[in-house]
Amino acid sequence: MKLTLRNLGRLREATIDLDKDLILLTGPNNTSKTYVAHALYGFGKESFSDTTVAARIVLDELAPGNPETEQRFGFDVIEFVERFLPRLLEEKARAFLTDLAEILASSEEFVARTEVKLELGAEQLARAKHDLLALEEKHVLKEMGMTELKSAGSPIWNFDRLPRASAAGGGGAPSPSRGLLSMRVFASARLGSVLDTHLLRIPPHTHVLTAERAAIQLFSRELSLKRTELVDDLLKLKSGPRVDAGQAIENALEQRAQRYPLAIQDGLLIANDLARFKAVNSSFAPLAEQLERGLLGGAIRIDEQGEMSFQPNDSDAHLSLHLSSSSVKSLAGLSFFLRHIAKRGQFLIIDEPELNLHPDNQRKVARVLARLVRSGIKVLISTHSDYIIRELNNLIMLSADKDGSVRQRLGYDEGETLSPEQVGAYLFDSEKANPITVTPTGIEVATIEREINALNAVSQDIYFTLFGGTGG
């Protein structure tokens, strides 16, 4: 599926192919890459809710009826897709646009001219129809007073009200109208989930590591305390004199409340609840160990109170995060994600994965990201790093090494290689995100190549002018 954003701030247009396994956003500073990354995070995070809302609107057109009296609610899921796909995508885009100001923590004026468009290709549509036809759902939902039936090979999806025994103990009288509305609501939610999975192919979970990730880990407790203090102050104002309470609360909010983009809000929520997340062990934990051992020279630890620290190799010392190196601060969130949160099928968004990293570690991070992609996690990065891009190019080229001889000689693993078809890349300028062709030899970023060539030319000019090419 392709998502197009138009007139988002200074960005005139960006169309991102979300079917790619690795999506790369690059370009000069102040070209709206972060806006797009945050918008895509919100799109993934809110997708189920938005699809459910869109499905309900379209279902009521396909299968009109009276929720107060109907005992059966059914529809043809293939007909739904064939007849109403454009309307479904339109309604889903509308729902996302309604949330966009809150997702970005912007004013309504900032997104007043923004347009959102969703597109699904013919190949994806054909695949989805095949999957939807093969879908099988058979449930008796006693707590909701209904049954759900969708047989494999049949396009018909039915929800039926269960009969309920009469007060005298007799059998089969239909249930009264009370609660019948939930049958359509439930059907919309079920359909929304299925459409996200089989039609739109949107990952069920989205995780983000923002450019502010180090600050989030360092100051999350202090920010949480500030929020608590603000709530306490508001409660005191609310209990004060009625005539002034409303204006006083408004003034307090304007003076002290801080709005954060959804991506940063969620990062703060996780940072404040590390102890709970720590209880879950991910199948990607070995990759976290590889990251810590190969890049950090130690291990990220979480104590019972949810405090994060760093333990260097061959040491019993636990360094508080503020005493650890900038590379540890930058990669701690990724390591924690891999060890405790990562699941196959997720969508991981990282803003500037190269932050605070030496070039050799930037290359290693590129290889870790490729391993994630090969393991079933969709990854989007926004980067300025020539080292990360060139290492990704190496991994793309190595996908052509059929017998593995080049990989083995250079120390690469087959699980790090990427096919060109898996990768989507976009070069942002002052107005637009321009697609970059991904070839078997990788990605060429014109702005980065231009600056490298300019730097080399200046260096050669200085050298030959001042030293005459004699070496001094």
Image (cartoon, helix red, strand yellow):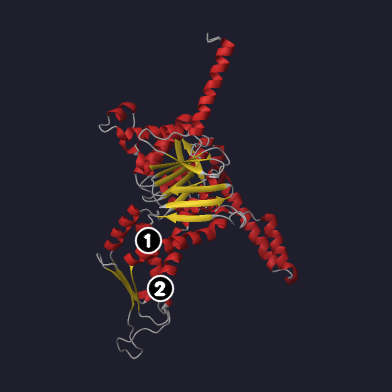
Q: Quick one: 52 or 7, which is closer to the camera? A: 7
Q: Is residue 417 left or right of residue 245?
A: left
Indicate the position of residue 119 as horizontal and vertical percent values. 42, 54
Q: Give, as a three-letter code, the residue at label 2.
A: Arg
Residue 206 vs residue 303, the one in the foreground: 206
When asked about the image quadrant of residue 62, the answer is bottom left
Q: Position of residue 90 (x, y in %)?
A: 46, 61
Pointer 1: what residue?
Answer: 195
Identify which amino acid the numbered label 1 is placed on: Leu
Q: Residue furthest bottom?
A: 168
Give the Cα distance between marks 2 and 1. Answer: 16 Å
Q: Secondary structure at mark 1?
A: helix
Q: Secondary structure at mark 2?
A: helix
Q: How far across and how far down the image is residue 4, in percent?
A: 48, 51
Q: Earlier in the sequence, mark 2 or mark 1?
A: 2
The location of residue 322, given as percent across then percent down, is 57, 40
Q: Is residue 53 left or right of residue 201?
A: right
In this rendering, does residue 313 appear at all? no
Can the viewer see residue 156 in this picture? Answer: yes
Q: Residues within 10 Å of mark 1 (few under 14, many from 20)?
A: many
User: Is 344 located above or below residue 148 in the figure?
Assistant: above
Asked if residue 250 lies left or right of residue 80, the reply is right
Disc sitting over residue 437 in the figure:
none
Question: Nearest the camera: 258 or 398?
Answer: 398
| Pointer 2 residue | 184
Give me the residue at 30% from left, 89% from top. Answer: 170
Q: Where's the C terminus, which quadrant? A: top right
Residue at point 51% right, 29% down?
Answer: 450
